[in-house]
Every structure is written in C-alpha cells, then in structure tokens.
Image: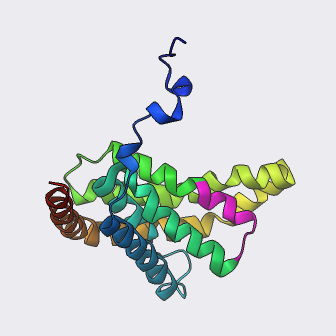
Amino acid sequence: MREMSSLWCIPLHNYKRRKLKLALSEVALFGILGGLTFAAKMVMAAIANIEPVSLMVMLFAVTFGRKAVYPIYVYVLLEFVTFGIQLWSVNYLYTWAILALAAWLLRGMARPFGWAMLSAAFGLLFGTLCTPVYILSGGWAYGLSWWISGIPFDIAHCVGNFVIALLLFMPLRKALERLYGGMRKGISAEKN
C-alpha cells in the first residue's frame, strides 16, 4: 500500500511522537509548573484580571517548545477541577494555545519590552479572542455586548500583563532555561 505524503495521512505509528514523549522528570516538572501557575493566579485573584498566567504561558512556549502544552493544560485542568466546566472553559482550551504559538514564533526576541508588548496585546485582545464562544452560544448581540462590557477588564489585563512581563520575563526565562537545560542533560545521561 502506498503511503501518503501529507501530514494528515501519515499513520499514527509513523508520526514523530518522540518529540512529545516525556521523561519522568519532565512529567514532574510540568505538573509542578502547571500547579504553580494556578497557585500564582489564585494568589493574585483579588486583583481583577491581573495574573501571571500569560507570562507563564509565554515562558513555557519559549523554553519547552511543543512540550509547553503539558504545563499549560495542567493549569487549564486545575481551573476546570476547581471551578467546574462552564462556558468560559471553552475559551481556556484555545486562548492559551494562541498565546503559546505567538510566543514560540517570537522566541528569538531578546528585549524585555517586546515580550511585555506581546503580553499586553494578548491581555487587550483576550476578550476579543473569547467572543466567538459567546456569539456561538448566544448570538451576535450577546457576544458583542459581552465583549463591550469586558473592555475595562481587558485594559486592566493589558496593563497588568505589560508590567509583569517587563519585570519578570527575562529573569524567569533564564532561570527556566537553565533548569530545563540541566534536566535534559541528566535525561540524556540516563539514556546513555
């Protein structure tokens, strides 16, 4: 039987699954990082829409590449377990992935101001990114009114994301890359 060359037609056993395969230490690290992201958000919950999640998602994307899905969705799972599955839950399934993809595409950016601008833009657009779910569930009027009423929260989200990323992205990136680089050396040594 002739094999197709399209990614969509590759049998699952031939697909390069090893890129997402995890070592036990990675499972532990990603679980801890997802849990810490959730805990940090809860600590800051009293301040509306000021949260460290956007920062952490960007850090995961630039440090772990494809494997960033693990700590991101550990965080999402903790949100679902704590607050239940509701309409906003659908938004969390894709909005964080959009930010992770944007951060991964810009992973070569070296200036903290650029990361702060990306994080701020995401905060400002968060309501816009969530609006399709509300349009699909309640119609155009509902989606539009939901988006408009959330603009002040998006502005707060924008400002908070900017400040947090400006101050913390570069030092946390260095620390996380050092930690993960050391871990990967240990994993390679165990395999040999």
> Looking at this rendering, what residue extends furthest in the top direction?
2
Where does residue 24 sit, x and y in percent of width and height? Answer: 34, 67
Looking at the image, which is closer to me, 31 or 76? 31
Taking depth in this image into account, of 149 and 65 the one nearest to the observer is: 65
Q: How many marks?
A: 0
Where residue 62 sits in the image (x, y, percent)?
30, 54
Is the C terminus in the top left, top right, bottom left or bottom right quadrant? bottom left
Q: Quadrant of residue 36?
A: bottom left
Q: Is residue 93 above or below residue 5?
A: below
Identify the image quadrant of the N terminus.
top right
Residue at 75% across, 61% down? 146
Q: Is residue 35 magenta?
A: no
Left or right: 51 in relation to 162:
right
Query: Is 91 in the magenta?
Result: yes
Seen in the image, is 120 located left or right of residue 90? left
In terms of depth relative to the viewer, which is nearer, 94 or 45?
94
Residue found 54% across the figure and 88% down from its top = 46
**Which secondary structure class fits the magenta region best?**
helix
- The boundaries of the magenta stretch are 84-93
Colour scheme of the rendered structure:
rainbow
**Residue at the spot x=39%, y=49% of the render?**
20
Residue 165, x across and y down, in percent:
33, 67
Q: Please tell me which residue is depicted at 38% across the width and 52% down the height of the picture.
A: 21
Q: Would you say 23 lies left or right of 85 here?
A: left
For this rendering, which residue is in front, 190 or 119? 190
Q: Is residue 89 above or below residue 43?
A: above
50 left or right of 138 in image? left
Q: Position of residue 129 (x, y in %)?
A: 61, 52
